[in-house]
Image (cartoon, rainbow, N blue to C red):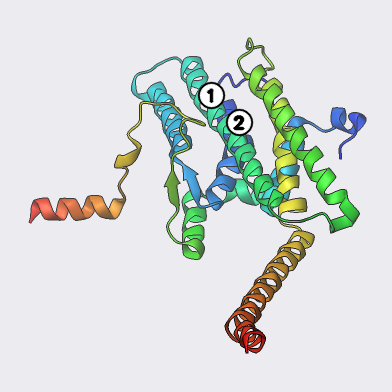
Amino acid sequence: MVTLKEKSEITLLQRFEKTIERWSNQNIEEIRQEPLDKKRGEIEKKKGQINLISEFPFIGRGNVQRENIISHEDIEKELDDILR
Amino acid sequence: MSSETPKNLKELFEFYYNFVKPLYSQIQTQNALPFETLFELNAAFDHISRYWHYQEPEEKVVDKAYGHLKRSCLDIFKLRVKEARKQFEELKKIDTSAIDQGRFDSDLIRLFTDIKNEAKVARQKEGEYRTTNEQEHVFELWLPVLDKCVTLEQEFYGSQGVNWAKKRQLNMSRRRFAISILAAFIGGMVVNYIFPFIINWLIF
């Protein structure tokens, strides 16, 4: 728990970094330096393909076709079929 | 890092590395990535590109891109509250009254109430007039909410005491089930064999 005095001395950014480190169990600089695609690759190795979900209407705007998301592989497969 | 709204690309990318990337990185690990978040990042990228491709003024593209990046952060804060609520609802289904002599339940309820109340205030204030310290103003309100959501996840939802309570509840329900099967068996035996015997004995 951060006291009022401590709060004024610690910046918003520092408090944010502490929270992220607590949440992720990782050093904040490691998180910043690691490329996102590399991080995604590691997650996919452990948990499988990352699921894309829609959180509309909780967040986001309404002008998006959520049902029509397809993967890289599906696109390549469709193209293969067209070009055969 | 300046706490003011970014005015140039350097400051914009400072904001990205300081706040956006850590949040995005963490939401990615949960293996349920909202594509609304991806769209905000993509929109920011597009605005930035216009600085070079269409020679739009730097301050203008930064302002637009910042709006999208800030939106993505605020969305992630809100999703964290949603996740905290889900965890709270799951915990309510478990008998945790024996954990920490009852303090677990009261602390959990207090924490979740704080999360809800502070999130309400933060959300209301989002739409207020932009000041030069707008970034700090909005994030200053959401950061304690995020912090409490992390506390709920780590100190309550993921606590050893909850695992113990879940196992205890499971064992008790298995025991109740076994007793009900046994009682049904004994009841069946009584009805099928003992009652007819008694009735026959009474009649004859």
Q: Residue at x 81, y 48 (%)?
A: B105
- Estimate the x, y position of residue A39 in percent, counting from the top left: 52, 54
- Location of residue A64 by image quarter: top left
State the residue in front, A20 or A54. A54
Q: Element at badge 1? A: helix
Chain label for disc 2: B
**Hey, which residue is sitting farthest front in the picture?**
B204
Q: Are marks 2 and 1 in contact (CB under 8 Å)?
A: yes
Q: How many marks?
A: 2
**Amino acid found under the numbered disc labelled 1:** Tyr
Q: Say which amino acid is labelled 2.
A: Phe
Under tag 2, what secondary structure?
A: helix
Q: Which residue is mark 2?
A: B15
Would residue A28 be visible to someone looking at this image? Answer: no
- Binning the other alpha carbons within 10 Å of mark 1 as few (below 14), some (14 to 19) or many (20 upward) gives many
Frontmost residue, B7 versus B114:
B114
Give the numbered dot on residue B133.
Answer: none
| Residue B55 spot, x, y in % from top left | 38, 18
Horizontal and vertical percent for residue B162? 75, 59
- Residue B183 occupies which quadrant of the picture? bottom right
Residue found at the very far top of the displayed protein: B129
Q: Locate the N terminus of chain B by quadrant.
A: top right
Please say if A67 is above or below B66.
below
Q: Residue at x 76, y 56 (%)?
A: B95
In this view, the residue in front, B75 or B124, is B124
Mark found first going from the N terminus, 2 or 1: 2
Can you identify the residue that label 1 sits on? B66
Q: Is residue B169 visible?
A: yes
- Chain of the residue that carries numbered disc 1 in the rendered image: B
Please provide percent x and percent y for residue B100.
88, 56
Real-space Cα separation, disc 2 to disc 1, in angstroms? 8 Å
In this picture, is A58 found above or below A28?
above
